[in-house]
Image (spheres, grey):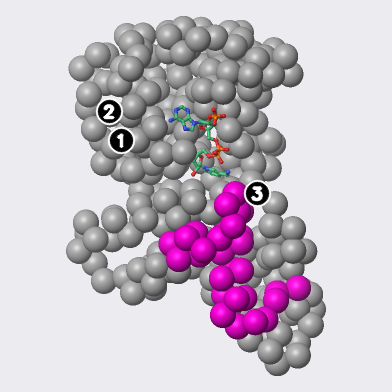
Amino acid sequence: MTQSVAFIGLGAMGYRMAAHLPKYFEKVYVWNRNFDKAKQHATEYGTLAVELTEAVQADVIFSCLPTSDDVETLIDNVNIKSGAIWIDCTSGVPEAARRLAERLKTQNIDFLDAPVSGQTIGAENATLTVMVGGDVNAFECAYPAMAAIGKLIQHVGDSGAGFAVKAINNMLLAVNLWSVAEGFSTLKAHGVNLDAALNCINASSGKSMVTETIFPQRVLSREFPVTFALPLLAKDTGIALDLVHEAKLPAPILALTQSLIQAANLTAEPNSDFSSAVKMYEAWTKIILK
Ligand code: NDP
């Protein structure tokens, strides 16, 4: 039975995800590199801000860091409790998940790759989708902890499968974001009112999450709120394209989208939201999407 839970990495996602755990678990440890955030979390939500060495003594340990490299480096430098389950909510690299799962198994520790989707609002409302790769028994044991932060908790296969699903999901988001920018620029060039067009498309077959929320709330509003950083999306499309290459498949749309997102990331202002990728297209066309 899970006695204690820890959350490592209180960033845009982690801070909000960890906030739900005290509703279900008596002891919830939090740790963050900038430790003031952990102390702030403890004050706000009744969690316990502890040193990393103590956090990794919990029965269930969540991590949500930018990359798999960050997680591997962190794991390299700690002694995790034997029998613990590590739930990595980072959008990571499938190969790293396989490596970590294999290595930790020798220490009687289960590693689940459990990336999430649903943005910061989903983290806040505990409505995230959690896509999980790894041992099924560990998945079942860790299910209550994951259910505290998410709505759909889906086991998708062996180690690495969760990270793979997440990378392809975010590639599809990127494809959609870019194609909606092209489509709406074309409509604007033809003098069409974009809000009216959006109303029609959101009641038609071309609708998507991008047309339903991203475009109205971030692009057409010109707000581009920084909740999911563009470099993180560029990382995810990179992981997805590596998967395509490993499978030796042709994927011209995905390859092109990866190049576009990389270029947008290189040319964007520092600290840009992923939706700012459309600004590169606006610079080419001189059409501002508003
Ligand atoms: P943030 O940049 O907001 O937060 C990153 C967190 O990781 C911070 O707590 C940071 O600590 C910590 N961190 C960074 N590098 C290290 C390191 N080397 N060692 C230890 N801690 C480190 O990222 P997000 O919360 O936005 O994203 C986290 C993960 O979730 C990413 O993989 C992202 O792709 C994914 N994701 C993000 C979503 C979003 O909408 N933002 C949605 C779904 C998935 P410190 O405070 O000290 O800098």
User: Which of label 2 and label 3 is nearer to you?
Assistant: 3
- Magenta segment, prevailing SS (helix, strand or loop): helix
On the image, numbered disc 3 is attached to which residue? 226
Q: Position of residue 71 (x, y in %)?
A: 38, 30
Q: Position of residue 123 (x, y in %)?
A: 63, 37
The front one of 52 and 208 is 52
Marks 1 and 2 close (CB-CB < 8 Å) = yes
Q: Which amino acid type corresponds to the residue marked 3 in the rendered image? A: Val
Say whether residue 248 is left or right of residue 215. left
Q: Secondary structure at mark 1?
A: helix
For the point 22% across and 24% down, the residue is: 103
Q: Which residues are magenta?
A: 261-290
Q: Position of residue 249 (x, y in %)?
A: 24, 67
Residue 101 is marked as 2
On the image, numbered disc 1 is attached to which residue? 97
Q: Quadrant of residue 149?
A: top right
The answer to whether residue 151 of the structure is visible from this angle is no
Q: Secondary structure at mark 2?
A: helix
Q: Which amino acid type corresponds to the residue marked 2 in the rendered image? A: Ala
User: Taking 15 as reference, is 47 above or below it?
Assistant: above
User: Taking 188 as reference, is 210 above or below it?
Assistant: above
